[in-house]
Image (cartoon, rainbow, N blue to C red):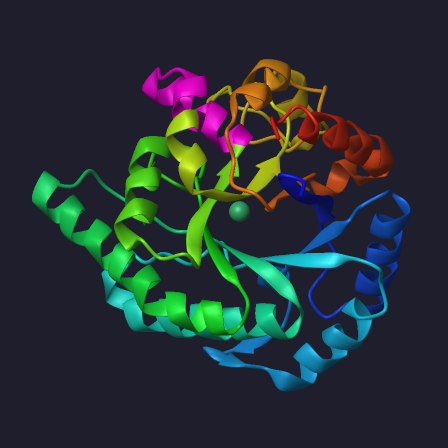
Amino acid sequence: MAIILGVGLSTESAAGDIAGLDAELGRFAEAGCDIAELSLQNMFVVAGGRLNLPELRAIEAVTRRHPLRYTAHGPLGTNFMDEAHIELHRAVCRAMIEAAGALGAIRLVIHGGVWSAPLADAELARLKRLEVESLAGLADHAARHGVTLALENLPPLPSIPHTHDAFALAAQVAAVNHPAVGATLDIGHAYMMATLRQQDLGETLAAMAPHIVHIHLQDQFGRLDTVRTWGKAEKLAYGTGDIHAPPGWGDTPFDTLLPALALKRDTTMIMELAGHFMHHAADAVAETKRLAGLIPV
Ligand SMILES: [Zn+2]
């Protein structure tokens, strides 16, 4: 059995554009994807913390037509350290699990672990426990729906002032200690965080490795988004921020990082390509497959 269960791309079609999603999944299959990541954060599948069945059924009819396996991405706004809205975050996540399960997705990528101002140690520890309890409380529900929750390491960005680094994220998943809860490694996010914290990137990936169930591959320069630039092309020109470019466009040292990663069997991998680079999808998928082959079996 291969370590990597499959490689794919994540959907970029707009919410409500069912025909666009259908065409996009067709292009993904043609580009050589085994998997597509359904961007549930861009779909009308949940309404007010409940499943929205009319939209779910319409999307299900489309996903069934394509020879792909699926993973899913949850809302960027999910944050189990946001105590004021904790019950709403949990309800939305429950419904997202149900949507992911109905669409045949085997992973649900979860954002979170964000706080807006520096916190005293005891308060930070209390909010981290809230996140652990939230994930633990959703884990059985996820398992029943055939979904593994995959808490993602986020990048340091102006919109994400404080979040877990790789070591803290690994500790959160370890504290949940449930087979239906693992980590999503976004290699680009880890690269930026290692820059900010002056950590060795390989050591941060090694800390997450025992918990990784899903990978977001993307290329960039691990350079913080601190230069005043206008638009995506300038960010690429300066190599700043969370670029999500095809492998080879940035300087992430994949060829040394990936052979050192010891992963669980059946890890899934998505080339999380920004929509404005999608015209390079086929080459990006081919290169991602080559890189997946560097991970030791
Ligand atoms: Zn994400």
Residue 269, x across and y down, in percent: 64, 41
Q: Is residue 281 above or below residue 99?
A: above
Residue 273, x across and y down, in percent: 70, 39
Q: From the viewer's side, name the closer residue of 39 and 68.
A: 68
Q: Is residue 153 above or below residue 15?
A: above
Task: Examine the structure image and report whether residue 40 is included in the region drawn in magenta.
Answer: no
Q: From the viewer's side, name the closer residue of 211 and 73.
A: 211
Residue 285 location, quadrant: top right
Q: Residue at x 73, y 75 (%)?
A: 60
Q: Is residue 4 left or right of residue 74?
A: right
Of the 4 image quadrants, the one containing the C terminus is top right
Q: From the viewer's side, name the closer residue of 68 and 62.
A: 68
Residue 8, x across and y down, in percent: 73, 45
Residue 283 location, quadrant: top right
Q: Residue at x 72, y 19 (%)?
A: 248
Q: Residue at x 34, y 60 (%)?
A: 135
Q: Is residue 243 left or right of residue 132?
A: right
Task: Examine the structure image and report whether residue 196 is included in the region drawn in magenta.
Answer: yes
Res 286 seen here: yes
Query: Is the magenta region chiefly helix, strand or loop?
Result: helix
Res 163 seen here: no
Of the 4 image quadrants, the one containing the N terminus is top right
Q: Is residue 189 above or below residue 138?
A: above
Residue 125, x across and y down, in percent: 15, 46
Q: Residue at x 52, y 26 (%)?
A: 261
What span is in magenta? 187-205
